[in-house]
Image (spheres, rainbow, N blue to C red):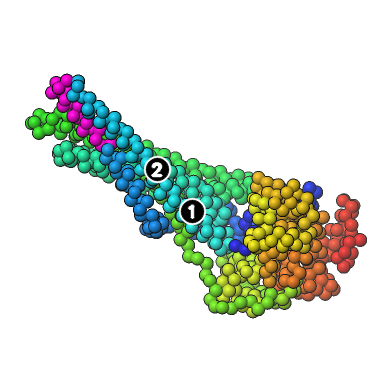
Amino acid sequence: MNPTTEPGTEPGAGADPEPGADPEPGADPEPGADPEPGADPGAGADPGAGADPGAGADPGATAAAGPAGDARERALLPVATGAQTLAAVGELLRGRRLQALTAAAVLILGTGIGLLTAPLLGRMVDLVAGHRGTASLTLPMILLVAVAVGRGVGTAIGGSLVARLGETVLAGLRERFVERALDLPLERVEQAGSGDLTSRVTGDVTLITRVVRHALPEFTTALLTIALTLVGLAVLDWRFLLAVLLAVPVHVLTVRWYIPRAVPVYAAHRVANGALQHQLLDSVGGVRTVRAFRLTDRHAGLLEERSREAVDLALRGIRLVSGFFSRLNLAEFIGLAAVLVTGFLLVGDGSVSIGTATAAALYFHSLFNPVNAALFLIDDAQSAGASLARLVGVSALPAEPGPTGDTEPADGSVRVRALSHAYTPGHPVLSEVDLEVRAGERVALVGASGAGKTTLAKLIAGVHRPAGGSVELGGADTRALGPAGVRRTVTLISQEVHVFAGPLADDLRLARPGASDAEIAAALARVDALAWVEALPEGAATVVGEGGHRLTVTQAQQLALARLVLADPPVAILDEATADAGSAGARTLEAAALRALEGRTGLLVAHRLPQAATADRIVVLDRGRVVETGTHAELVAAGGRYAALWAAWSDSRRAAPAEGGIPRPRANGGEA
């Protein structure tokens, strides 16, 4: 992702609203205009909502149920199959075979030592039954203590090695997931919704981590204990093993009853939690927008519906666990009864001693905990498996396509031919748009909300793939350049700016990792930010963002513009980059933006018409089509669509002195 591109992040992250910020009257959308997918809803909407009405929204966030719910399912990020998940884990384990074998050997040794407890107790029973005296019990007692110590040490070390192995594998998987998630096309993330990806990064990773640290060592120990105990029973007498195996059908039937029901429940529960989390982000993050458009009841209903779905699935899981353990209790009864009856018969005919029969009974009794643990941990395994499949599903996504040739942009020109796009089939946002921007030219995109400005900007920046037509950068087709080539050529800055937690200088070095202090200072000076940065407690070393010094909206945008200067792309797109600040802040940012655009091609999605008036050329869009193009003076004189927008903006400013004393605009866009 280009370091200066921050779509999909919350503008409130690390930036405080400036006091006294007031929206421009000219920013209000025209009555009846439909919000453009991916565009800001207008001045009446809180930019902090972070929710674009279309492309940026999770399909599930605005859908209640039925077909819309199916659309949400189709838009989610992929989930790996069982085979794909096992293959991914096997690949991560391939380079750690020695570590895995060592952990298994230590666990087997510790578990094997522990299994000597039952024969020793059986020997003590035989000694007592034979009236051998208390002195004969000394050695078995000492051996029991040694067995307990040996088992404890072996199990502790083995469990630690297994946990370490699991953590190492999980770390590798997590790194692959994060690397792939950060490399996902923004269009794909927007289609899935931020809640789906966020729930995988947080909830799924947390669950798998807990299972790896606690359940995996316990599960491994339980399986080894079961296997070695069965061997021990066969050594005592093969008929004891047959008696124990009578309980196996009940265990098998229990697992076969449980797994087919549990897997879909846990998978659905993870999806439901992701949808709930996205809805919370959408509703709470956009609370001002929700209130402004009187959508409180609708969002409350959506939250209630999502919560009810998650709770219902959780209760289904609890009922499954209850039925699971009731069946295990039946298996324990059958197995223990069979061992006791077998022991009674074998002792009666002299085949085994009382001590051997006792050892067999103790062996089976010692299976209660490991069998229950192993089968109960299937519950955790199913949850972890569902989460693991969600992580592998993202990490296994194919890498973004590379360039199809050695074509490189010749300059900073932009050419759009017959460009069309639709977020929903049958509802085009752009239709047959043609546009040419010369290298170094500054062009403003103007139009009512829903006209297609932001969509056009995102298509040029490579955020979305056009449904039809083509985009050329410096004479090179974006399909030939590939996503990485487009990102090197075009930088998109929106009003949704994120301030990363850490020193301010490190935040800027995201755009150019090797930037010197002098280059950072020059970039800050170019966007008129050096003075306030030097006034911070530690200057550019001051920690900003979450948990650090909070920046105003204007300061956060100046950082984004400084990143643009450091990245130095041939083409820069400013999508409402000054709309989030107040009047004074917007003027400061407009001046900073003009300096940041010097020497490069600039496309401005203009919410403030005075900003558009300073551009070399203005392109007016209406209902997804270019309807006018020309300079500010030419379009005002033409008396068309732009002239009507300018007149409406001017009238609103003339009325302002009576209300707030704001200077009245001149006809040429200046202020009286």
| Figure quadrant of residue 447 | bottom right
Residue located 42% across and 41% down the image = 214
The type of residue carrying mark 1 is Arg
Q: Main secondary structure of the magenta part?
A: helix
Badge 2 or badge 1: first in the primary sequence: 2
Residue located 50% across and 55% down the image = 175
* Residue 195 visible in the picture: yes
Position of 443 compared to 461: left or right?
right
Q: Name the residue under label 2.
A: 160
Residue located 61% across and 70% down the image = 486
**Residue 644 place in picture, x, y as percent:** 81, 67
Position of 666 compared to 149: left or right?
right
Image quadrant holding the N terminus, namely bottom right
**Residue 144 place in picture, x, y as percent:** 26, 30
Q: Does the magenta stretch include residue 332?
A: no
Q: Name the residue under label 1.
A: 174
Position of 371 compared to 571: left or right?
left
The span picked out in magenta is 114-133
Image quadrant holding the C terminus, namely bottom right
**Which residue is at the front of the view, 459 or 71?**
459
Residue located 52% across and 48% down the image = 202
Residue placed farthest to the left in the image? 349
